[in-house]
Image (cartoon, rainbow, N blue to C red):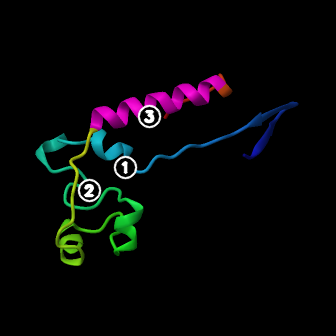
Amino acid sequence: MPTITRGTALMRVLEVGIDGTDTEINQGLYGEPPPGANEILDCSPEASALGIRNGMPLRDARTVVPDLVVLPPDPIYYSQSFDRLLDAIEDAEPFVEPD
């Protein structure tokens, strides 16, 4: 975790980036499919071992693994999980600025 000096005070800076969080939030804007609508957003270690990769088009993934099981996105679960993560970070450090 980098430390930044501002005047005489030291600040610790931690940036937490979660892949795919904006995909679900922006779903349905402008009447277009959201980014990632036809691609793999995340995959299990087992799927990775078979050659599936994040960002891979679904068509390509199904070519690599014909019996691929694709789970639908769950934006409510993602939101609740993100909120729990922020709560845990805020418990450790009260000066959190969610972006």
| Residue 74 in view (yes/no) | yes
Q: Is the residue marked by circle 1 packed among few (<14), some (14-19), or many (20+) residues within 10 Å?
A: some
Are the residues at dot 2 and dot 1 in contact (C-beta closer than 8 Å)? yes
Secondary structure beneath label 2: loop
The circle drawn on residue 82 is 3
Check residue 90 for magenta coloring. Answer: yes
Report the front residue among 31 and 48: 48
Residues shaded magenta: 75-91
Which amino acid is tagged 1?
Gly
What residue is shown with label 1? 20
Which amino acid is tagged 2?
Gly
Report the front residue among 59 and 17: 59
Relative to 31, is 55 on the left or the right?
Answer: right
Check residue 49 for magenta coloring. Answer: no
Residue 6, quarter of picture: top right
- Badge 3 or badge 2: first in the primary sequence: 2
Give percent across and percent down for residue 39.
24, 62
Residue 28, quarter of picture: top left
Inter-mark Cα distance, 3 to 1: 12 Å
The circle drawn on residue 81 is none
Which amino acid is tagged 3?
Phe
The circle drawn on residue 36 is 2
Relative to 69, is 47 on the left or the right?
Answer: right
